[in-house]
Amino acid sequence: MPTPLNPTVSSVDFSTRTTTNTVTLLASNHARKKATIRNDADVDLKVGEGFTPTSILYTDILPPGGRYLVGTVETVYAYFERVPQGRVLATEHI
């Protein structure tokens, strides 16, 4: 019988942020089996797997309401063109 994955959910709430467009969503974790990101903010999220994304350098774009399956054990970052309203949820399974 397979071992169940234990999810850890973290949330980045942008209601208190005024100047930061880049945030760390998931720390590097070599025990990570899988992870997902859900963009509940009001602007596109640019994902960087293993590097800090910018407006022109990123792994993928998540529109508002979008989901993303993380494909790395490295640190995962998010970049927004402007400070968003809303939050981003990151769920990590180890």
Image (spheres, helix red, strand yellow):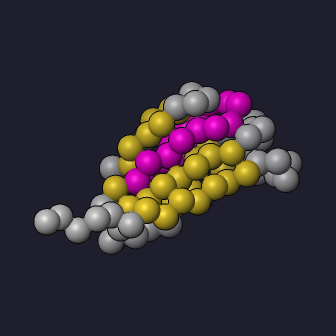
Point 56% across, 56% down: residue: 25
Q: Position of residue 39 (x, y in %)?
A: 59, 38
Point 44% across, 48% down: residue: 36
In the rendered structure, the answer to whether residue 88 lies left or right of residue 26 reads right
Work out whether residue 86 can be spotted.
yes
Point 38% across, 44% down: residue: 69
Residue nearest the viewer, comparing 43 with 3: 3
In the rendered structure, the answer to whether residue 67 lies left or right of residue 42 reads left
Q: Where does the magenta region start and end? A: 35-57
Q: Please, is residue 63 above or below residue 35 in the view?
A: above
Point 48% across, 36% down: residue: 67
Q: Is residue 80 magenta?
A: no
Q: Position of residue 4 (x, y in %)?
A: 28, 65
Q: Please, is residue 94 above or below residue 88 in the view?
A: below
Q: Position of residue 88 (x, y in %)?
A: 62, 46
The quadrant of the picture occupied by the C terminus is bottom left
